[in-house]
Image (spheres, rainbow, N blue to C red):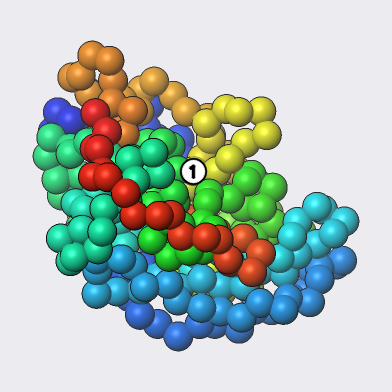
Amino acid sequence: MGKGLASGAGAGPGAASVGGGVVRTGLCVAGVAVACGAAGAQTPQLKPFSVEIPGAACSYDMVPIPGDAAKGIKPMWFGRTEITWDAYDPFLLALDEEKGMPPLAADAVTRPSKPYIPPDCGYGHHNYAAICVAHKNAVEYCKWLSARTGKKFRLPTEAEWEYACRAGTTTRYSFGDDAGKLGEYAWFEGNCRDDAEGPHPVASKKPNPWGLYDMHGNIGEWVVSADGKLRIMGGSWQDKPEACASDSKAEFKPEWQKTDPQIPKSKWWLSDGQFLGFRIVCEGDGSKPAAEPGGADRPGK
């Protein structure tokens, strides 16, 4: 069983309400075709692409998602999987600068503080989704990747996330209403017990109709809410089937930092958040001016 980030304790009971989504983001894989069957959905003009992760020998696959004017959804790219440690480590450890890239201006990107123990909590690293990351951590990662690549990456909104998860369906899950089939698409409470407890390697279950993996279960994913509250969506390896539905969501709880010994609590890490992480989207044509190289990066505290 994995250990808590700050104290070494396992996930507390407050962490059992949403999480999970094993993602395959440290791998270089071919883009997948998108099935556009949603009523009112616009035919996508975007094509799949892979973004090279700065400072790492891997890429992250982006899948085109059709827009739907009736729902106020614009065409965009969604991460094929959640962000893995393979894709996250260069940001945390400044591997991009170690590889000779110029430091980014301090007002452009702030990096997280180093965690007390390995942040994967002993569950797995290569091809496992990055976990225990606070909302600010995920937001700053998007800023970093945008600055390094010249493309505009960000977290999805609640509406965008649900739309992409449903993938043109109107059922409880992207594969229908039968929760009995959830194990084919998700890691959740029913198949994550005993020796199988914890998050699993990304993309090890079936994808939804638009080629997105782990939208149900494995780890919950941070989204941007209209009311400003911090939320994750999708359910996790700790959750029951109903919490892994396409519209499932959970608000931030103080229990997610229960074992963090710091005062004040870390703004970067959630000591009891072994069930949550994030997935990113890329806007429009993906273009955005790259940040000008500047002074040394100042790590967050």
Query: Does residue 16 lie above or below 91 as drawn?
Result: above
Dot 1, how many residues are within 10 Å of its Cα: few (below 14), some (14-19), or many (20+)?
many
Observer-nearest of 125 and 144 = 144
Judge left or right: residue 219 versus residue 104. right
Observer-nearest of 300 and 22 = 300
| Residue placed under numbered mark 1 in the picture | 222
Specify whether residue 124 is in view.
yes
Q: Name the spot of residue 141 as percent of width and height, x first.
A: 38, 49
Which residue corresponds to the image point at 60% horizontal and 28% vertical from the top-left?
228
Q: Name the spot of residue 186 as percent of width and height, x first.
A: 46, 60
Judge left or right: residue 234 versus residue 57. right
The total of numbered circles placed on residues is: 1
Quarter holding the C terminus is: top left
Question: Picture quarter containing residue 177?
Answer: bottom right
Specify whether residue 198 is in view.
no
Q: Name the spot of residue 279 as percent of width and height, x first.
A: 47, 55
Judge left or right: residue 60 versus residue 2. right
- Callout 1: helix, strand or loop? strand
The three-letter amino acid code for the residue at tag 1 is: Trp
Question: Picture quarter containing residue 132?
Answer: top left
Which residue corresponds to the image point at 66% horizontal and 77% vertical from the top-left?
46
Query: Does residue 235 lie above or below 255 as drawn?
Result: below
Which residue corresponds to the image point at 47% horizontal and 28% vertical from the top-left?
252
Judge left or right: residue 243 versus residue 190. right
Q: Name the spot of residue 179 as percent of width and height, x first.
A: 58, 57
